[in-house]
Image: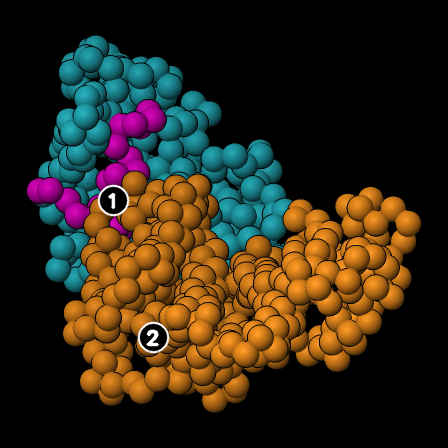
Chain colours: A orange, B cyan
Amino acid sequence: MKALIVMYKEIVDNLRDRQTFFYALLFGPVLLPLIIGGSLVASFKQFAIDFDEVTELAVVNEQAAPNLIAYLYSNNVDVITAPEEVEAAVRSGKIKIALEIPDEFGEQLRKANPAPLTLYVNDADKDSTRAARKINALIGGYKNTINSLRMQHRGIDPTVFKSIELTEFDVSEDGSSGQLIASILPFLFIMSMIMGGFYLAIDTTAGERERMSLEPLLALPLDRADVVYGKFGATLCFVLMSSCLTVISIYGLFQFFPTELISGGLRFDGSTLVKAFLLVSPLTVFLSAALITVSAYTRSTKEAQTYLGLMMIVPMAPFFLLQFFSLGASTWSMALPMLSQYQLLEKVVLQDDINSWHVLLSVGGTLLAGLLLLRLATKLYRRDRILM
Amino acid sequence: MINAEQLQKAFTKPGSGLFKHEQVKAVQDVSFSAADGAVTGLLGPNGAGKSTTLRMLATLIQADSGSATIDGLDIKDDLLKVRQQLGFMPHNAGIYPRLSARENITYYARLCGLDKAKAHSRVNELAEQLEMTEFLERRATGFSQGQRTKVALARALVHQPQTIMLDEPTNGLDVMATRGLRAIIRELANQGHCIVFSSHIMQEVAALCDRVAIIANGTIAIEDDLDGIRRRTGFDDLEDAFVEAIGAAPVGAAPVGAALTGVSE
């Protein structure tokens, strides 16, 4: 009951603090997904070639190769006439890409000689290289057709020249690009949770010590455990609030995601996100307890900010661990807070089957670790040192 | 009513060199008593052990040895009961700047077990008593030191404790605010409360206290009423008496024929 009074006071108090409010409700849940997810969306859009998209291609001497132009046109390439100084125009970005067809192109084709073409690309411009890869692929297709026709014309089976046909078969359950995006999700959740509780935890523990309000508070007829539980509860509320808002903003963000460009059955619909949120939610308890414990250990807000700033690296650890080593889901990894959530969320996003035993381990392990941390925080509060 | 017997407390502090710690004896031997209906001054220079003594009595830290009772309750056994009896206003007690004066006091009232209605009327009562109605509903950011002290005092009094301990409450207060606070403390003593008041300023204590315990180097050097202190130290001037008491000279070695006159201020 008294813990509830402490909790209520801390929530009211911190809702009036602009810094806490900003980090809990704006930075973690909105700005962070926007920065990370947004740049991811942008880079995917940049690197993925969309053959349905219309690409503009400036062509010098287009009348020299009417068939090629018609082929390109039928593959969503709009041909425009190139300006005079074609090289300079591509370099300056006035046009993205240009194709120069020499006068002898048609003649060389007719003679069955190699027909030359020049493609002007600006390698420093991502849009230009992306367009070049598309044009390259299209012309490659055109070349293969002509090669086959030339051989058939001479009575040779075109397959003669295909001594080996290598097929690459991706056996991973998903595309690697999908996996990267899948591991972004828990990262965003965990970061926004930490940001959500960050300032409140500091303000309610280290901040309370610094402004000398802890001593009279602890002199009141209440158990110190109630003080810890109250502060924990308030932090938990902010962390929960922050993660709920994160669900909404991630949902909004991934409406813009070009999922059809990513290999693997990646899905970011509402039910996926709700499932992901439920799986990640035990972390709210664990992270709130961790924030409270670390700031109870420190003597000043500055010290707390330093320690908790270092703590921000912790959620990145599983992210990199999973990027560099293919860790399979195992009993021990599923009992670890954060690592298990990373692995489970990846499965959710990639529509893999989830072992219910793994879910149980993850929830149990995370909650247990949270409770242990809470006990530690209570112990720290019972020491004389808390008032020194 | 407070009875302290041979209280001791040492702290470990980081010493010179890595992993080296040294013991600092903050309180070596503190015994004194404070009666109901009187103001007892705990007087001593900075670092004498006043705050540590009060913190032990307020059950905030545990004494290494010795014992103390507050209204007959042992500070080691009945933590929560002791705290229920006790109103403690620590040195530089902070209040919550983003809460109004009323919210600050109500928070403590609720934590002491008062329900909403009772807390509300108790806050009104205290606001009247401590003359703080005009800033009661204002947020505490920008409060003057006097206003902050009043809020902190109201918090300490909110559960109507029998025993009240104030650690250097007049620090940073101007003359008018100090006088106002003295009047409040006197009034509380007249109502029958036991009041312990710590200070490092002799005049402060002389103006207010019925009894004084002078503490130096973690030990009570002398405990008596003002006249008794003058008599035993042999100095008519209370400041001289204070210096004498905390100095090297053994207490009780007062010169023969020391003045027995009343309060000089």
Q: Nearer the viewer, residue B216 or B251?
A: B216
Foreground tag (1 vs 2): 2
First along the sequence among labels 1 and 2? 2
Q: Is residue A212 visible?
A: no
Can you name the residue that lies furthest to the front here?
A154
Task: Report the quarter where the N terminus of chain A lies.
Answer: bottom left
Q: Quadrant of residue A325?
A: bottom left
Residue indicated by mark 2:
A172
Q: How many numbered circles does the render carry?
A: 2
* Alpha carbons under labels 1 and 2: distance apart: 53 Å
Q: Are marks 1 and 2 on the same chain?
A: yes
Q: Position of residue A377 (x, y in %)?
A: 26, 58
Task: Check disc 2 and give the amino acid type.
Answer: Ser
Q: Is residue B47 magenta?
A: yes
B142 w.r.t. B135: above or below:
above
Neighbor class of circle 1 (other Cα within 10 Å; few <14, some 14-19, many 20+) is few
Q: Residue at position x 45%, y 83% from top?
A: A265
Q: Residue at position x 35%, y 64% from top?
A: A287
Q: Quadrant of residue A146?
A: bottom right
Q: Residue at position x 21%, y 50% from top?
A: A383
A361 w.r.t. B60: above or below:
below
Can you name the residue that lies furthest to the left here?
B65
Task: Check disc 1 and give the amino acid type.
Answer: Arg
Q: Nearer the viewer, residue A74 or A345?
A: A74
Q: Which residues are magenta?
A: B44-65
